[in-house]
Image (tube, grey):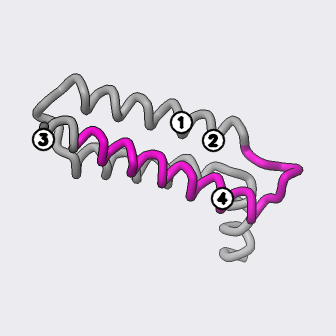
Amino acid sequence: MKKTLSILGLTAFVVLTTATFALAEYLLAGPGSFPYFHLGCLIVGGLTIVSLKQKYVKLYFGEAAGAFALYAVLIALFTAPVAEAVKTLIS
């Protein structure tokens, strides 16, 4: 039961993080230049993390959630709108 709740919680975290990423990118970039490839990479990464959590019992919830959060930040850094924002911030 504990394993099922942990996987369910991780799945909810992955879905909410992905939805937040999609909303932020849509508001920042607009519908014309939405980064669909980056969203797909984030979804595949989330599925991978959840499946690893399901397979390996010793993988803690915090470790899996932290890994996915860092992966989401890495994906977000390489989108065009965030790169432009960082460029203007540095200049």
Amino acid type, mark 4: Leu
- Using residue 87 as the reference point, say whether residue 65 is left or right of it: left
Task: Provide the residue designation for mark 3.
Answer: 2
- Disc 3 is placed on an element classified as helix
Q: Position of residue 84 (x, y in %)?
A: 75, 63
The mark nearer the N terminus, 1 or 3, is: 3
**For residue 23, which numbered disc appears in the image?**
4
Q: Quadrant of residue 52?
A: top left
Amino acid type, mark 1: Ile
Q: Position of residue 78 (x, y in %)?
A: 63, 49
Task: Provide the residue designation for mark 2.
Answer: 39
Q: Which residues are magenta?
A: 6-35
User: Given this view, does label 2 or label 3 mark the residue nearer the observer?
Assistant: 3
Contact, mark 2 vs mark 1 (Cβ under 8 Å): yes
Magenta segment includes 14: yes
Q: Badge 4 local density, few (<14 within 10 Å), some, or many (20+)?
A: few
Amino acid type, mark 3: Lys
Q: Residue furthest front?
A: 1
